[in-house]
Amino acid sequence: MARDDELIGSDRNEQGQFVRNGGQRCMECPLERLPGLHQPLSDVRRWIAAFREGEMRFGRGEQVWAQGTRPPYLYTVLSGVLMRTRLLEDGRRQIVNFMFPGDFIGLQGALDGEISHSVEAMTNVALCAFARGRFFELAAQQPQLSFDLTWLAAHEEAALEEHIVSLGQRNARERMVALAVFLVQRGIDTGLAPDGVLQLTVTQSQIADMLGLSLVHTNRSLQALRRLALVDWTLTSIRIPNMAEARRFARLDSPSPAPRPYI
Amino acid sequence: MARDDELIGSDRNEQGQFVRNGGQRCMECPLERLPGLHQPLSDVRRWIAAFREGEMRFGRGEQVWAQGTRPPYLYTVLSGVLMRTRLLEDGRRQIVNFMFPGDFIGLQGALDGEISHSVEAMTNVALCAFARGRFFELAAQQPQLSFDLTWLAAHEEAALEEHIVSLGQRNARERMVALAVFLVQRGIDTGLAPDGVLQLTVTQSQIADMLGLSLVHTNRSLQALRRLALVDWTLTSIRIPNMAEARRFARLDSPSPAPRPYI
DNA sequence: CCCATGCTATGTCAAATGACAGGGTTTGTT
DNA sequence: AACAAACCCTGTCATTTGACATAGCATGGG
């Protein structure tokens, strides 16, 4: 997992560390090297560099956003993995989706007041921070970026759609395989799983909250999948011995190889 | 349900009727009167009028888009209700979401090649058709529209998020109530349920496919809700006697009253 | 070393949900 | 009247999933 230790910390927050900086570091953006991303043109990049406010860091388990609040910043994920969760009043929790490097956090926050979900870091993460108030400038001045943003929104929508299909139509084991395939694929695309094994700490309780299953049933299903040699999912890693077979088992379509833009 | 009979039909399709026209009818757009929509400025509207290609009509049950194809047009819903569905190879079907007047159909289609879902008319519908190929012009020339599009995408995302919470955390009855509240609320916002009762033909089999339940269990749960006087959902209408109580039962947040933009 | 903590595993029973089969009702057609 | 189609309802039984209780197993701190 992204281990970003050399913190240039300045402003201490109750959660997260803010690193104000003019943006010249954009020219050595960590997203440049990632296989699954397509790079912005250099003048667009200059504009992004001027737009950004600084960098933010959070440790595993820290909340980046809290449901029902009004976020001051929007972010692009520079490194690490986060999850988007929703809480019901009675304590039930649903994990809605995941964010990998290159993903944009905050469309909802940009346009509405309060956000309907929380965002929590699953690993140590580094985020590129933009001011929420200046969001409209982006659409007005940079049609390409606005287009990219719409692209990201549409693809996020497609991912949620897939998740809905899982929850609605697939049984416990199929759901797990579908989720594992999704995560590993995103890991490969963003350079977090170069060898096809995603090193990511996910507890069974988190898996349960993603898939809408009880903890116990999650445990049993994981064991079954391990026995079937379909998915080997431990606390710290996800391994899929045979990707094609896993896809077939969960009745997943073949992956779409389109490179993602980022901001 | 929208009964648009005075067809000025010209081009007969195997499904749907296309009405080519320059767009002067935009100035008497049926979306103008709807309570939940916020109207575009008049110069933006003129631009939309020039952008649009014509009008398309479909009857209940007809497919507007088929999963896996490459749609030539993008649409804004002028009247009627549609649903977005996904099919698994083995025949299982998941209904992903619904489209009401003012909704934009096609972000995914605009940006990718093939679309991952089908779109089917639940009533007779009229759609405003835009050419897919000219989509980028919109972002480049009309920042306000591009912004609105992003707004719609973000809110579609929020709706799917809510749906995921339902499927993942709520039991059968709660899911039904949540769905009923969602549909009736959208009906009220778009003028389809002025008296709080949504006149919309939905079969129990469709409800089952939205909620990820079996047909039989759907039937029983519907009856239970009728007995509890929470939701009275018949083949042709949805009535919620006490909205506040229904919301409490399904543990739904209060509705966000933000008016939607449209294109 | 002990202890606390957080996570995974297992057993037993109960509740929710699904599968199958069949009957009833409405509506439209001949 | 007869028929068919599409939908809704009900009974019975099987399967999946959840609830609760408990045990095991690492890891880290004193």
Image (cartoon, coloured by chain):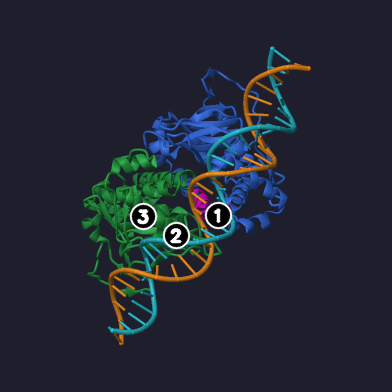
Chain colours: A green, B blue, C cyan, D orange
The residues colored magenta run: B158-171
Judge from the rendering whether residue B209 lies leftward or rightward of residue A166; answer left or right: right
Q: Are marks 3 and 2 on the same chain?
A: yes
Chain at numbered mark 3: A
In depth, the one of A171 and D11 nearer the eye is: D11
Residue B77 falls in image quadrant: top right
Q: Position of residue A159 (x, y in %)?
A: 41, 46
- Mark 2 crowd level (few <14, some 14–19, many ≥20, 10 Å Cα): few
**Which residue is identified by label 1?**
B170
Spatial CA span between label 2 and label 1 = 18 Å
Look at label 2 and name its amino acid.
Val
Query: Residue A98 in magenta?
Result: no
Question: What mark, if any, has residue A223 been given in the picture?
Answer: 3
Please state the chain letter of the residue tagged with numbered disc 1 in the rendered image: B
Q: On screen, B11 above or below A224? A: above
- Tell me which residue sits at (30%, 40%) in the image: A244
Q: Which chain does the numbered disc 2 sit on?
A: A
Would residue A154 be found to the left or right of residue A246 on screen? Answer: right
Q: Out of A11 and A131, give the one closest to the viewer.
A: A11
Residue C17 at x, y percent in the picture: 55, 48
* Residue B229 spot, x, y in % from top left: 72, 51
Q: Residue A216 bears which disc, if any?
A: 2
Whether residue B41 is visible to the viewer of this picture, yes or no, is no
Eye-nearest disc, 2 or 1: 2
Q: Is residue A217 above or below residue A35?
A: below
SS at mark 2 in the image: helix
